[in-house]
Image (cartoon, rainbow, N blue to C red):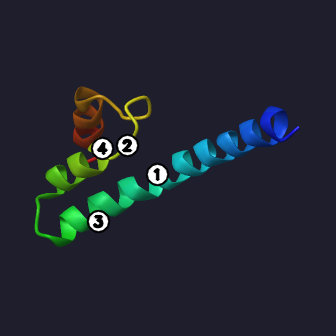
Amino acid sequence: MAYGFVNPLVGLLEQRLAESTKYLQSIKAGLIASMNGYAPSTAVEFARKAMFSSDRPEFSELEKHLKENR
C-alpha cells in the first residue's frame, strides 16, 4: 500500500510545494536585484529567469506589457 498509494501522493505533494515556492522565489529574486541597485527592467529580468520555463513569459511579451503600463 505504501508503494502504490503513499509514495505517489508524497511525490505529488512535493511537486505542488515546489511549484508554489517557485513563485515566491521569483519575487525574492526581483526584490534582491532591486535592492542591489539594478535597474528595474533588469530586476524584472532576474525575477523572470527564476520562474519555470513553462510559466515564464517571453521577453517580447514582457517588453510589450511594460511599455503599455508606463
Q: Tell me which amino acid carries mark 2.
A: Met
Check whether the beta carbons of the residues at disc 1 and disc 4 lie within 8 A of each other.
Answer: no
In this image, 54 relative to 13: left or right? left
Q: Nearer the viewer, residue 2 or 54?
A: 2
Total marks shown come to 4
Residue visible at 17% across and 50% down in the picture? 41
| Marks 3 and 2, how far apart at CA | 14 Å
Question: Which labelled disc corresponds to residue 48?
Answer: 4
Measured as percent of width and height from the top left, residue 50 is found at 32, 47
Q: Residue at x 45, y 58 (%)?
A: 24
Of callouts 2 and 1, the N-terminal one:
1
Tell me, yes or no, whether the two marked residues, 2 and 4, touch with CB atoms within 8 Å: yes
Q: Are marks 3 and 4 in contact (CB under 8 Å)?
A: no
Identify the residue under disc 2.
51
Q: Is residue 22 left or right of residue 6?
A: left
The label on residue 23 is: 1
Mark 2–mark 1 CB contact (< 8 Å): yes
SS for tag 2?
loop
Q: Nearer the viewer, residue 43 or 68?
A: 43
For the residues labelled 3 and 4, the Cα–Cα distance comes to 12 Å
